[in-house]
Image: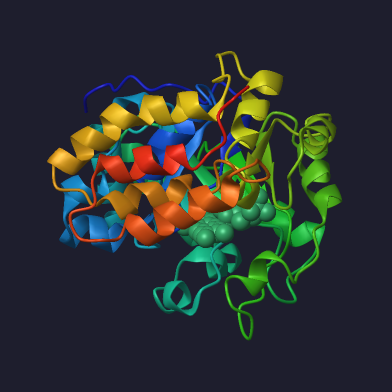
Amino acid sequence: MTKIATMQMPSPISVAPMMDWTDRHCRYFMRCLSPSVGLYTEMVTAAALRHGDKSRLLAFDESEHPVALQVGGSEPALMADAARLGAAAGFDEININVGCPSDRVQSGQFGACLMSKPRLVAECIDAMHAVCDVPITVKTRIGIDDLDNYAFLREFVDTIVTTGCTTFVVHARKAILQGLSPKENRSVPPLNYERVYRLKDELPELKIILNGGVHSIAQCEAHLQHVDGVMIGRQAYQQPWFLTELEAAFGDGTAPNDRDEVIHDMLPYIEGELENGAQLKHITRHLLGLFAGQPGARAWRRHLSERAHQPGAGIEVLKEAMQCLPKAA
Ligand SMILES: Cc1cc2nc3c(=O)[nH]c(=O)nc-3n(C[C@H](O)[C@H](O)[C@H](O)COP(=O)(O)O)c2cc1C
C-alpha cells in the first residue's frame, strides 16, 4: 500500500457535501472565496465508482485542497474500492454518508438508515482502513424516526469508534425516513444542538463537527465553544460571499477584497474549462448568488440565467454580466 500525503482540514469551518451543488466547478469557486475552508464533494455512490466513469466522478482541481470525497454505500468490499480510488485520486479525507434520507438512497440500504446498522458501518470503515491511509470520517444525523435520543446516537458513535474513526460530522436534526422529502428533512425535524454538544462533552478525544442551520459568524463562534468544527451547507451556497467572512474570522488565508476580484480569479479557469468542452451554464449557475444583497444583483442573475444556457455561450457572457453591475465609486 502506498503512503499518500493528505492534508488535514486546517480550518474549523467546512462546506457541506451537497448533491448537484458542490460539484468541482462550485468547489473551485468556493476556494477562490476562502483559501482554507474544508470542501466536500457531492455524494458519489460506491457502486457508481466501481461501474461508472471514475475519472469524471473523481475529478478535482489541485487548488481545492483540503477536499474530502463523500461516498454513499454499505457493502464493505465496494466501500473499500471507493476509498482506494478516492485516496489514489488525492482526496484528503473520505467521508461516509450516514445522513441522507432519500428513497433512492434507502432502497440502496445506505444513507441515514445506516444509523440503525452501526456494525455494518464499522465493517465498511474497517475495510476502507485496510486499503488506504486517508482519514475515514462519518457524516450522520442525531437520530432516525423514533430512534431519537442521545443513547441511540452515543451507541452508534461508540460502535464506529472501535474502527479507529475519530471524526464525526453531526447534522443536528433527526431524519424521518418515511413521508418527508430530503428537502423537508433539512427543515422540518427540529435542530437539537445540545445533543451534539453532549457527544463532544462526553467523548472529548473525538473530533465533533456540528452541522445544520448555521448562517452567521456569531453562531459559528458560539458552537465552537462546544465542538471542534462547524459545517455549513445552504448559507455557503446561497450567500457565497459569506465564505470570505468565514475566512477572515477563522481561516489562515487571505480572502478576496471584492467580488470582482473573485470573478477575475475565475476567468482563466472558466476559459480553460470551456476549451475542454464544459458548458458555461454549468459553471455560472454557482456564481448566481455572488452579488446577493448588493446593487445590481438582480441584473447579474438575470443576465447569467438568460444567456449562459444558450448554445455556444462563451466567456463574453460573464464579462457582459459584470457590465450590469454598478461601477465602484
Ligand atoms: C441541495 C442539497 C444537497 C445535499 N446533498 C447532500 C449529500 O450529497 N450528502 C450529504 O451528506 N448531505 C447532503 N445535504 C445535506 C447537507 O450536507 C447538510 O447536512 C444540510 O444542508 C444541513 O446543513 P445547512 O443547514 O447548513 O444547509 C444536501 C443539502 C442540500 C441543500
At a point 57% along the width and 40% down the height, the residue shown is 240
Q: Whole-percent x and y of residue 21?
A: 45, 54
Q: Whole-percent x and y of residue 104?
A: 42, 77
Comparing 206 with 192, the one in front is: 192
Residue 150 located left or right of residue 94: right
As displayed, is residue 188 above or below residue 318?
A: below
Q: Which image quadrant: the N terminus?
A: top left
Q: In this orientation, does residue 61 appear? A: no
At a point 43% along the width and 36% down the height, the residue shown is 29
Which corner quadrant of the image does residue 305 belong to? Answer: bottom left
Which residue ends up furthest to the bottom in the rendered image?
Answer: 179
At a point 67% along the width and 27% down the height, the residue shown is 245
Q: Whole-percent x and y of residue 297?
A: 58, 47
Comparing 169 with 220, the one in front is: 220
At a point 78% along the width and 58% down the height, the residue shown is 151
Which residue ends up furthest to the left in the rendered image?
Answer: 276
As displayed, is residue 287 above or below residue 34?
A: below
Residue 292 located left or right of residue 8: right
